[in-house]
Image (cartoon, coloured by chain):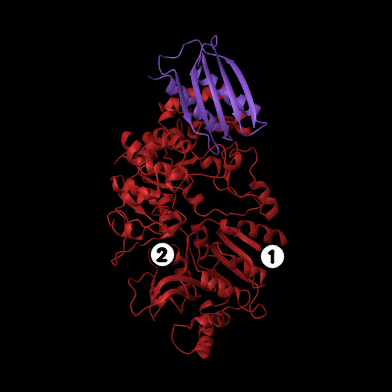
Chain colours: A red, B purple
Amino acid sequence: MSDKHAIRNRKLAKVRQAFGEGKVIATERTVELLETVIEPGNRIILEGDNQKQGDFLAAQLARMNPTKVYGLKLCVSSVGLPEHLDLFENGLATELDFAYAAPQAARLASMVMKGTVKIGDVHTYVELYSRYFAELRPDVVCLVANETDKEGNLYTGPNTEETPPLAESAAFGGAIVIVQANKIVDRVRRVDIPGAWVDFVVESPKPFHLEPLFTRDPALITELRILMAMIAMKGIYAKYHPKVLNHGIGFNTAAIELLLPTYGAELGLKGKACTHWALNPHPTMIPAIESGFVEAISCFGGEVGMENYVASRPDVFALGRDGSLRSNRFFAQMVGHHADMFIGATLQIDSQAHSSTFTAERLVGYGGAPNLGSENRSRRHRSEAFLKAGAEAHDGEPMPQGRKLVVQIVETFQSAGKPTFVERLDAWDAMDKAGFSTPPVMIYGNDVSHIVTEEGVANLLLCRTPEEREQAVRGVAGFTPVGLKRDRRMVEKLRDRGAIQRAEDLGIRKSDASRDRLAARSVHDLVRWSDGRYQPPSRFRNW
Amino acid sequence: MENLSFEFEGGAKPLPVGAPYVVVGIVASSNLEVLAERKDLGGKCRFEIATAAANFSDAWKAVLIDFMDRSKPRDVLFSINDFSAIPPVVSLRLDQALEQLSCS
């Protein structure tokens, strides 16, 4: 057993010798600092998720001398920057643990094939954070902040996101904590991370990268998506009344958000459903918030352009005493995990309702989807939705139980005419190529409660056998090869039982699936709903 | 560019009284335009399709059979200008056209 705290003290003494006292390190000496505290074989956590990225420290790490520093084990939630993989190409790092890699998915796949990167494993966010307190205890942790003072007190701004669990694993685990801050100030606006947990701070030459990942332009919402949204709202929201829920980031759920003030009000959802959310500050939520549908939103992170709007709604968002959002990825994931409902999209679904976004060419990872989109067998508190879904799922069993709603909402075809429904997930090929021992499935079929497509909603809770489940999936798979292979008689039987409901079974006219129903039909409309408090990034402005 | 033509036996019930014809949709990428008009076709329905995507005859047939099974219209001529719409969009437009033709 090596005493991490003793090693840490030895490293700190080396830094004091080279740099003198004090936590503030000159920006241009960052590489030298890193080479002083990082030893061969160390485990490095680099902060970076699907939104904020410790881009300056990533670039400095990649510039270290591979004859001094090598064999590193890199942990990063989202492999979002080229520099993350440069560490491997430059001979500094060998092993990678991560949760999400979409921006670098193709390059990662080819580097794994070549043997340049050895994947420790692919995780969910909270799974990865948890392992930082178990087998993946770090030696050096690189964090991101908006502001720091000379004592290392950090203000992490609206995008606190994953800083707290990373900082905690380091501060009490004997690791060195290095922070890149946009600005070194005399007094931080708010202390998100106490200075006692921080060893060194550097001022980065430019603000850290922040991706506006959760902005969906209402102009791109098609009638097909509106139809699916209406099917979901009438077939699921109005039936179960999920109060606490999480939406994915796709256009299908954005359509639902924009239909809440119109169709949702017609369905009587206001106050009865969708009151509490695990969600980023989606701009498409503005009309629902302004219409009084929403009591509270727990945020994983912030969203570019939403800062002022969020600050103007302290009744809905968690704000610090400084008036800006405090997000927390770990806690929001837990809110979503214990919620009544998850609804989101995926790239592929097979006939047993297993879904994945992996292909052999793209190792995309999971992000938080498996935690949000899974049955929660540890939930104990009851709610209308939980009990109603449980009564369907456990009908006839001696022990009554609740059930979380886990809904996949997908178009039967992806863009470019690729079918969403497939007989064999590409995840099997990804498994072979990347050397995983099981296919990287995002959501397992037995966690899914409903599948919504243009063809209707399949209620898998009412399916009792694998054959029924398969026909329920095929029954909403439309004109994909999986859908065309359906057993028409069995599908009609499932329809009689309500295990499949078409739009007409729900009393939805196709002509009602019109863009006129959207509470906002453009980004400009969202700005108007917010009275100018929402300030979209320029790429979303066309007026 | 390909022109396709299909004819199917219609349902037993005549359409409710309503507009003589309707147009839904637009000819734009991944979309299509459907003109549905009441016409005495001896109880049948006819589909005249001009499509930008060739070699999808089987897919069209599957979508149209499904539509006829679902709605069972009769004596309607559907003229379609298609710009590579995926099957669910075709289904949606056909359903919308028939709904609007059937209401006055």
Examine the rendering and report whether any part of residue A185 can be seen: yes
Front residue of A507 and A474? A507
Q: Is residue A310 left or right of residue A464?
A: left
What type is the residue that disc 2 sits on? Thr
Image coords of residue A430 (percent x, y) = 66, 51
Up the image or down, A259 lies above or below A440; here it is above
Crowding around mark 2 (Cα neighbors within 10 Å: few <14, some 14 to 19, many 20+) is: many
Secondary structure found at label 2? loop
User: Which residue shows up at 48% across the image and 83% down it?
Assistant: A26
Image coords of residue A291 (percent x, y) = 29, 45
Residue A470 disc label: none
The span from disc 1 to disc 2 (Cα, nearest Å) is: 32 Å
Name the residue beneath numbered marker 2. A160
Task: Pinpoint the chain carrying mark 2.
Answer: A
Label 1 or label 2, whichever comes before in sequence order: 1
Front residue of A406 and A83? A83
Crowding around mark 1 (Cα neighbors within 10 Å: few <14, some 14 to 19, many 20+) is: some
Up the image or down, B20 lies above or below A26; here it is above
User: Which residue shows up at 35% across the image and 56% down it?
Assistant: A534
Q: Is residue B83 left or right of residue A164?
A: right
User: Which residue shows up at 50% across the image and 10% down it?
Assistant: B12
Task: Pinpoint the chain carrying mark 1.
Answer: A
- In which quadrant of the rendered view does residue A486 lie? top right
Q: Is residue B68 left or right of residue A92?
A: left
Q: Is residue A517 left or right of residue A313?
A: right
Image coords of residue A227 (percent x, y) = 45, 34
Up the image or down, A527 lies above or below A194; here it is above
Examine the rendering and report whether any part of residue A172 can be seen: no
Name the residue beneath numbered marker 1. A116
